Amino acid sequence: MSYIAGGGGFPWGAALAAVTSEPPSHWRRFVIVLLVCVQLLRPGSSQAAGVRPSPGPSEADGCIRASDILSCTAAGLDRVPRDMPISAVTIDLSHNRIGQLEGGGFEGLDRLQTLRVAHNQLIVIMPGAFRNASGSLLRHLDLSSNRLSVLEQHYFEDVPGLEELLLFDNRIVHVESRALAGLGSLQKAYLSHNRLTDFPFFSIQEHSHPHLSMLDLSSNRLSKLPLEDITNLPVSMQRGLFLHNNSLVCECSMYGLFQHWDQRGFASVTDFRQEHTCLVFGIQKGTVRFFQHGRYFDKCDLAAMSQGLKEQESSVLVKVGKPLLLHCVTTLAGRHVTFLWVSPNQEYVAPPGNNGSLKMYANGSLEIMAARVEDSGIYWCMSLDGRQQRNETWEVNVTVLAHQDESHEPFNTGFTTLLGCVVSLVLVLMYLYLTPCRCPSCRKPRTPATPSQGNEAGTGSAQSSILTPTPPATTEGPGRKVSTNKHVVFLEPIKEQQNGRLRAGMGGHLGLGLLLEAEQHSKLHSQAQQTEPVMPMFSDTPVKLP
């Protein structure tokens, strides 16, 4: 019996002797298959088959592996481990001391979808750092809380399928124009709490980033906003653009932009109204919350600014002789984009315009200087990007309204109401102050007083004068004119008692305010002198009791 070297102690000699003693046709074939199977099961055969070995006691000792998740959090690593399992879908390298991501550091991880390298000391990302790291499968990349200062163009070239990028709490001062160009599937990008002074908004248009719905640039050092580039962004991007807690300078254009977003109910503004501030220069310097202190922008023409921020409608109306500005709505932007308009008369209009009726600007807007009836029709705008070989079209239907006859215009309800109020006020004043005068021809003859009225006109007129303002008729003859000299006499009630009962005044009960004529006044005075116990009503001397 003999042993074959490398056979692991298996008695291959006995097997061969048994095979040679038998007919070779059947047993020889069986032994050959058996030898091949045993050789594949030997230790170290997985390397010959091209299978990556499982991690041994090396750089991944402090990591925890659970199914397809590899967690190396706070493992004291200063570089990316090289023996990570190829079946990992989620790798967490947070809270370590990794200073840079070297090229090929994640090579062979074809199933990787989530990579977290937050809370490290990253300063630079070398070219090809994410090469062969699942390519388009990588969805979530967390590089927050590191020391990155510049986002270079090559950082994210190898991850075109990235959907969520976290770069907040770094030291980023500049973002290169092509740094995010290759991320066509990007949906959310967080760059808050950095040191950015500007941002290339022109590099994230709808055609390059159709799924981008959130861009967080809050808590940076942005001082001025490129209004034209921001307004060219799709509405979905503007709705998720967060710019609060920056160093913005208080300008009318800036305030008009945020006021427009606030009126439209964008959550990026309505949820952070207290955090929107700007810097005021001049006599009073400082930071103000411009949504609470709008008085700083009282002199701004917000109506004119809002016109430029509104979306161009596909159908507009204009009166004859009025100017009209048409915007070329497109997602293309950049220096290589050219614009061309086609009028309803099939006339091609390019900057600066035609013979004077149409004026075209470099940003693609077309202005009708003075609208005419023959200017009505459909205007076509064509935008062409020569570098990307893309073009877009936009059409606007313009209707020019002729002047209407002013005589057929309907009454203004507000003017009619005001006119009615003025007429009513004039009539009331005329009724109060312009009473008709008495003419001699219209005066009626007076009827003489009868003798039976003497007593009533004398002593009893004091009581009747309380009920009527007209003076009573005199009894001294029809030729005597009625005196218009009226005196107001205030009589005090008599509090004196005689024989256990109150003594009434002259002519019965007398009120507090009596309207008496001069003649009645003298007659009552004479009667009062003939009566012994009666107190003198019209005397200032005190009353003497008997």
Image: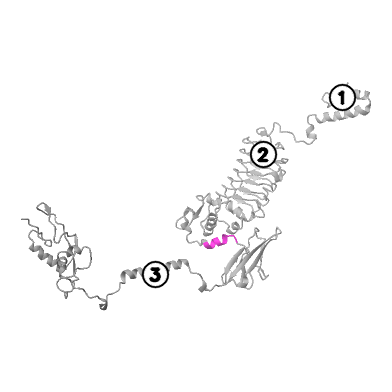
Q: Report if residue 308 lies within the magenta region.
A: yes
Q: Nearer the viewer, residue 368 or 275?
A: 368
Q: Which residue lies under the disc numbered 3?
A: 423
Label 3 to label 2, Cα distance in Å? 83 Å
The reply, left or right, for residue 19 in relation to residue 498 is right
Earlier in the chain: of badge 1 and badge 3, it is 1
Percent x, y of residue 259: 52, 56
Q: Which residue lies under the disc numbered 2?
A: 90
Q: Secondary structure at mark 3?
A: helix
| Label 3 environment density (alpha carbons within 10 Å; few <14, some 14–19, many ≥20) | few
Quadrant in the rendering for residue 306 = bottom right
Check disc 3 and give the amino acid type.
Answer: Val
> Which segment did they paint magenta?
303-312
Instruction: Look at the numbered discs 1 and 3 and tell me whether their residues touch, using CB distance below 8 Å.
Output: no
State the mark number for residue 12. 1
Q: Secondary structure at mark 1?
A: helix
Label 2 to label 1, Cα distance in Å? 47 Å
Q: Secondary structure at mark 2?
A: strand
Q: Nearer the viewer, residue 405 or 104?
A: 405
